[in-house]
Image: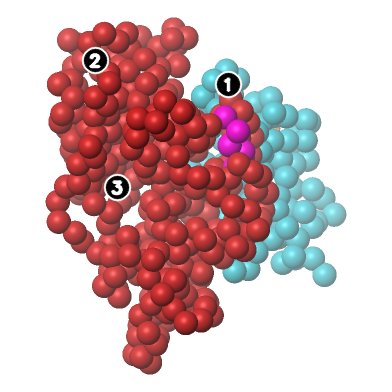
Chain colours: A red, B cyan
Amino acid sequence: MVQQGKPVEFWRWPETNWVNPDIDWEKGKFVTAGVDVGSVSTQVVILMDGEFFAFGNTRTGSDSPNSAKKGMDYALEKTGLKLENIDYCIGTGYGRVNVPMAQQAVTEISCHARGANFMYGPDVRTVMDMGGQDCKAINVDDRAKVLNFIMNDKCAAGTGRGMEVFADLIHVPVWEVGPRSFQISKEPPSISSTCVVFAKSEVVGLLEQGVPENEIVAAYCSAMAHRIMELLKRLGVKEKFVITGGIAKNEGVVKRLEKELGIKTAEQAWANLQYRKKNYPFDTQLAGAMGAALFGQAFLKMGKAKSARKA
Amino acid sequence: MIANYGFKDGSGDWYVTIDTDKCNGCGKCMEVCPEKILEVGPDEFDIFREEPVAFVKHDERKKVRYSCAPCKPGFCEQPAPCVAVCEPGAISHSEGWKALYGR
Ligand code: SF4
Ligand code: SF4
């Protein structure tokens, strides 16, 4: 069972962790970990010989090293595994160079491409990752090689952080933003500001005018969908199209984006039918950490890296 | 791989694009760039690649619109220095500057 932690804050997803009951890590050859330290949340994925073994999804704390440690402890919590038992650890995300237990750092772009390939299957062609600070769109081939990428990290409005500022401002928890954005009588015009500061004052203005809360939520979702679309237009979207990161859980944005693009996003489910049958948790936020842990497996197998296991 | 460095905002697309399949890592672009925004080193987006590759420095990615402006890439009679010096033709620029400086 996926464990849900700590009480709610409006702007962040609850913390979760899980361990695979079907795996005995002591029988494995290589245990690798991926640590994705984002500006808002931190994910740790642990693989045993390339199989999904455990994960922890926590909030990023005051600094990257502490967040990485906290995420790792949370992921290890119910595994019986210790940090010393891990053969290789790779850091990724915004704080990737500040992951103390990592032997190496790899960019989010590479990791999301790799993670999406593993989670959604090798037929994935476009991956869109909406992080807390930036937004990236990637075209990949069937071996998860990056063919083309584009990022937009100029402004927070089109990012996860923008959505959180918004959720906090109107006191709607982020996980309710999606459903609420459809509880409206008609689709409102979208928030026009592309800058997070202006978007904020625009929202305050709408609240003061007495515009129904759900309509404002809808307006913000469609603004974000539009921003993502603009980025994707330049890259060229191909199916199978997947969205990774927290925003993928926000159907208010996803459905509107699909409508604008005329392309559906792939079902959020394991390509691996065994995983699907066994109901292993599928969390779009794990793609980066998953990719990092997979690179660790590849490096060890190829002999490009040596095991750093201490016990 | 087509690597797009830069950003998009209300005024247009501001990207320096490097085709890493063409780039041979010779480093000439880095030498001629007056703003010193280019660098050659390990490919951080394709970690299995052995040869070095050109990229836009991290801190410069949000500023390319302004850094590249004096070169008027994509518009001037002369191509931008980085583009002119690159033998395999690996560097290009998005339309933002052209729209801004063109007639
Ligand atoms: S000049 Fe061209 S080939 Fe040489 S490093 Fe720069 S981009 Fe690559
Ligand atoms: S256009 Fe000019 S400033 Fe921009 S990368 Fe090329 S040489 Fe450097």
Please identify, in this view, whether the residue under mark 1 or under mark 2 is nearer the observer: 2
Judging from the image, what secondary structure is the residue with disc 1 in?
loop
SS class of the residue under badge 2? loop
Q: Main secondary structure of the magenta part?
A: loop
Q: Amino acid at mark 3?
A: Ser
- Residue at 44% across / 71% down in the picture? A182
Residue A230 visible somewhere in the drawing: no
Chain designation of label 3: A
**Magenta residue check for A45:** no
Q: Which residue is mark 3?
A: A41
Q: Secondary structure at mark 3?
A: strand
Residue pointed to by mark 1: B49
- Magenta span has A124? yes
- Label 2: which residue? A24
Callout 2 amino acid: Asp
Mark 1 belongs to which amino acid? Arg
How much space separates mark 1 and mark 3, taking CA atoms?
30 Å
Q: Respond whether the residues carrying marks 1 and 2 are from the same subunit.
A: no
What's the residue at 44%, 52% (across, down)? Answer: A248
| Left or right: residue B9 compared with residue A171 | right
Identify the residue at image location x=53%, y=31%.
A121
> Separation of disc 3 and disc 2 at Cα?
28 Å
The segment highlighted magenta reads: A122-126
Location of residue A28 by image quarter: top left
Image: A121 above or below B34 = above
